[in-house]
Amino acid sequence: MTLRGALGALRVTDLARLVPARAVPQPPPGGVYRPDGGTDRALDLARRAGHPEHRVRALAGTLGALDPRTRRAIVDPLGRADPGPSGPRDRRSRPLELGGEPARQTDATTCGSAVLGLLAAAGDPVLALWLVTGLRPGDDGGPGGRPRAGGASRFGELQRVLKRRTNRAALGPLPWPASLGTPPWGAARTARHADVRYVERVVAGDRDDDPVVRAALAAAARGVPVPLFTGGDLALGVATAVPRHVVLLTDADDGTDADARARRCRVYEPSSGTVHDLDAAALLDGARSPEVRRALGGWPHLCWALLPAVGRAGEAPHPARG
């Protein structure tokens, strides 16, 4: 590679190689967070998200009154447990919906907010219930128990709430500029999945076995999704050599399978509202693989990741109701 080519491939996050790498947290426990399509697992997640028992009981009653398809969309909003009526997962992409409407970011700056919203909903069926149906625990599901219209509007409201939280005091006492989207450290402060909290870690380069990417895949394989920041390099312009977009690693095959080469992962891309099925080993190949690049929102590189650290629930991620 020429000097010009080497400089063109540089990213701001490559500077992370000049300082000692921060520790990667241990993966979350298995068998706890992965949805199984059933109500019991969803109720356990609601408890882990910090909801009191009376609300969990009300949630159980509301879920029981819904039609099976709507209930499945609430207990598994990312569609991880159910491959769908067509059989095995599509090897390319599938649309993701909330209440029958596309689960997309509302504008060019809310990719991170959309990702954090779905991350929270996947670990909190109370929030998912509201997003999919507009209902709260204890509400009457209405005739047929079907979702109410307005899923996209509710998702947009959630994105606005989350954007305010991630950008507040992100530059010391100052807010992060709204036009620049979501800063990784603000996203880590806000990210929630049941009782899991997150820390931000830089993806230092395109190594085949990057420890941050490896930890992200391990977490996703145990049922805990991982937000990933993507971007460009100096060859695409100085402004692109920083994190520019956020996607969600929703799921990954277990890395202990005998044929590791067949390991797959799923990535939600919020600008299109689609989930992409990828070769897990190719996540760092966005510069070479059009399929991976589409899943990364059109950007060639992974730059940053929010890795899970199990904790306790705090501030509810959904809009408060007086």
Image (cartoon, rainbow, N blue to C red):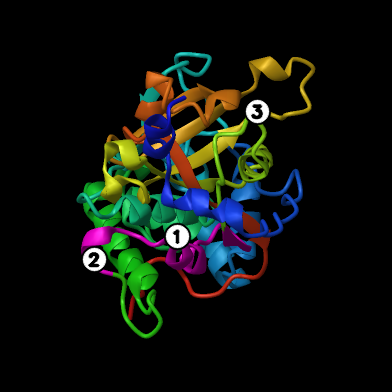
Q: Secondary structure at mark 3?
A: loop
Q: Does any portion of residue 61 appear in the rendered image?
A: no
Q: Which mark is residue 253?
A: 3
Kindly report which numbered mark, 2 or 3, lies closer to the viewer in this rendering. Answer: 2
- Res 16 visible: yes
SS at badge 1:
helix
Which residue bears the numbered disc 1?
184
Please name whichever residue, 80 or 74, is drawn nearer the observer in this view of the structure: 80
Disc 2 packing (10 Å; few <14; some 14–19; many ≥20): some
**Where is residue 15 shown, x and y percent of the image?**
51, 54
Q: Is residue 321 left or right of residue 289?
A: left
Q: Which residues are magenta?
A: 177-200
Amino acid carrying label 1: it is Pro
Mark 3: few, some, or many residues within 10 Å (few <14, many ≥20)?
Answer: many
Q: Is residue 43 above or below residue 37?
A: below
C-alpha separation, residue under disc 1 versus residue under disc 2: 14 Å
Which mark is first along the chain, 1 or 3? 1
Mark 1 or mark 2: which comes first in sequence?
2
**Of pointers 2 and 3, the one earlier in the residue sequence:** 2
- Asked if residue 22 is among those painted magenta in the image, a careful observer would answer no
Amino acid type of the residue tagged 2 in the rendering: Ala
**Residue topped by disc 2:** 178
